[in-house]
Amino acid sequence: MGTRKRMLRGLLAVAVAAMFGFAAQPAAPAAAAAPRANCYLTGDQQFAQFRAQVKAFEKEGRLSRDVAAAVTCDPRTAPQYYTYEVKVDQVVAPMWLSGCKQSSKWTITWSLGGELGGHSQNLNFCWSQATHKVSDWNGICSGYTTGWGTTNGWRWEGCSRDTFNPYTMDGYYPAGIHHSTQGHWSNLVPWTTDMYLNLDIWGHWDGTCDTKYNSTIRNYC
């Protein structure tokens, strides 16, 4: 009987322990220390000038500490932090019933602390409010890479699009001309996506025009 009671008490203890978690558990492994970031080709001369310039930009306040740290660790991530700006060399011309005009020169640039490159466009055309038509159109499509852009591996490849497309308005043709351009850059760093920047200008039969850079539209040129 005594042996039976001891067995019952043992079984009850095991059941209670299992119910409330008192049973001995194997020791949990010690938490592993968080691994340090694996930066890309640290000390490689290919990126030495880039990393030095990023450090200088951070010191000057032109790059935040977080951005500078990210691109210093892995220069390949730099395109994630590019900023864009549009500049206008504006041309102001009197409006007549007919005539010819040269639009402002539009340039879209991109930067990482300093300017990397830019793409420019304009549109020249003649118009007549009497005939509701445009004529004699032409325009520039150009681009460039700065020294800082070259340090980042960028190279200007030219205009991948430079087209003039006349169109109909209110039954008149050609009542307007659309100059559509796209600047193209490639990068020497493997697996870096090419850069494309878009500019568009529409010139109308009344001498007015509209401009679009990437997805932003302005009702002047």
Image (spheres, rainbow, N blue to C red):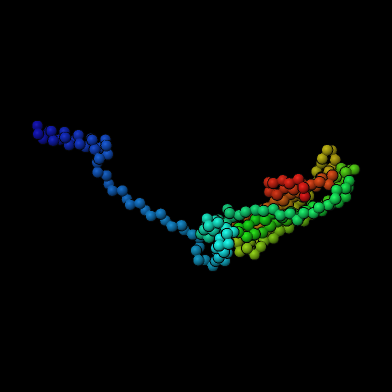
- Is residue 50 visible to us here? no
Residue 109 coordinates in the image, percent (x, y): 67, 56
**Residue ID at (41%, 54%):** 34
- Residue plotted at (54% across, 58% down): 68
In the displayed image of the protein, which residue is found farthest to the right? 130
Location of residue 221 with respect to 42 vertically, above or below: above
- Looking at the image, residue 87 sits to the left or right of residue 12; the answer is right
Q: How many marks?
A: 0
Q: In which quarter of the image is the N terminus?
A: top left
Report the residue that reaches farthest toward the left.
1
In the picture as drawn, the residue positioned furthest to the top comes out as 1
Quadrant of residue 17 within the rendered picture: top left
User: What x and y, as percent, mark residue 140?
Assistant: 77, 56
Whether residue 58 is situated above or below residue 135 in the rendered picture: below
Residue at 56% x, 60% y is: 58
User: Where does residue 81 sit, x and y in percent of width and height?
Assistant: 58, 54
The answer to whether one can see residue 207 in this image is: yes
In front of the other: 55 or 198: 55
Q: In this view, does 137 lie to the left or right of 76?
A: right
Relative height, residue 201 to residue 154 (above, below): above
Q: Position of residue 181 (x, y in %)?
A: 73, 52
Residue 16, relative to residue 152: is it above or below? above
Q: Residue at image x 69%, y 53%?
A: 86
